[in-house]
Amino acid sequence: MNAKISQLVEAAPAVLPSLLLCDFGNLATEVERLEDAGVAALHLDVMDGVFVPNFTYGMTIVSALRKLTDITLDVHLMMVNPEKYVDAFVDAGSDIVTIHAEAVDDAVPVLNQIREKGAAAGIAVNPDTPVSKISNAIAHADLALVMSVNAGFGGQSFIEPVLSKLGEIRELKGGENVILEMDGGINKSTIAKCTAVGCQLCVAGSAVFKTPFGNDYSAAIEDLMGEVASEDL
Ligand code: DX5
Ligand code: ZN
């Protein structure tokens, strides 16, 4: 297992802040605040405006973040033709590169490409995509990302039925060891439902960056983790 992934397994369950709603005008300060909060990884939401009806950023922001921090960069590619860009995202400093099962005909060669470049490979499924879609690919992945909102925007509501997917992934041949990540609508009222079904990495955007704690991200993350049942810690 990739060393960065092993560190995340050690840290689990963990909140990964999603860099979509942060203050990009003060990225260095934001990263310092997140380092002070002791986050295990940063979740970078890359959107191409085609796979999802939203557009964010690309390799330049990954490179900028790589210069700012040693924290694991967990890069979520919401894009068509990811095979064209995974090398560049790894070269830019990504530690984990996750592609969407819906964006490729066959995820296996792209997952292998990510691993051959030296990063950990993740496979993501949107809420409407059945786990069966990744039954072949999962054995070639280090991480499975179960979307609990439709990819594209922060601030959406948690789609509860996806919770059953984590157990289904664990049942897949090759699914027993992947790290399980959920993404979207994770907040104080939903995080415990995620960890209760085995979620190891809980991605949070609004619940970290849009809270009464302002930019005290330690307090926001502590408040979130305070909802996680002791037996899941
Ligand atoms: C949505 C992104 C998520 C989202 C999380 O496409 O993948 O990471 O930004 O934001 P919240 O936590 O606000 O749903
Ligand atoms: Zn994401």
Image (cartoon, rainbow, N blue to C red):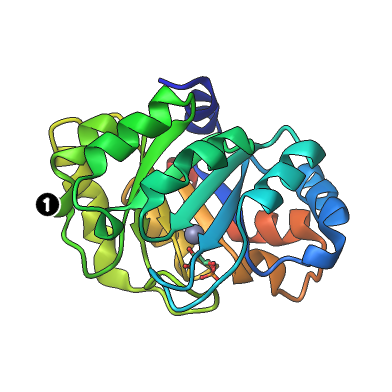
What residue is at 66 percent from the left and 60 percent from the top?
223
x and y percent of residue 91 in the render?
59, 33
Q: Is residue 104 above or below residue 215?
A: above
What residue is at 70 percent from the left and 52 percent from the top?
61
Q: Is residue 46 above or below residue 54?
A: above
Q: Which residue occupies the foreground of this view, 154 or 189? A: 154
Q: Quadrant of residue 94?
A: top right
Asked whether, in this view, residue 29 is left or right of residue 146, the answer is right
x and y percent of residue 88 in the render?
55, 40
| Residue 157 appears in the figure | yes
What residue is at 54 percent from the left and 27 percent from the top?
4
Q: Amino acid at mark 1?
A: Ser
Q: Which residue occupies the foreground of this view, 131 or 165? A: 131
x and y percent of residue 131 in the render?
17, 53
**Circle 1 crowding by C-alpha within 10 Å: few under 14, some 14–19, many from 20:** few
Q: So how many labels did they put on this image?
A: 1
What residue is at 62 percent from the left and 49 percent from the top?
59
Q: Quadrant of residue 121?
A: top left
Asked whether, in this view, residue 158 is left or right of residue 34, the answer is left
Q: Mark 1 CB in 8 Å range of ligand 1?
A: no
Asked whether, in this view, residue 146 is left or right of residue 186, the answer is left
Q: Is residue 221 above or below residue 7?
A: below
SS at circle 1: helix
x and y percent of residue 176 in the render?
23, 31
Q: Which residue is mark 1?
A: 132
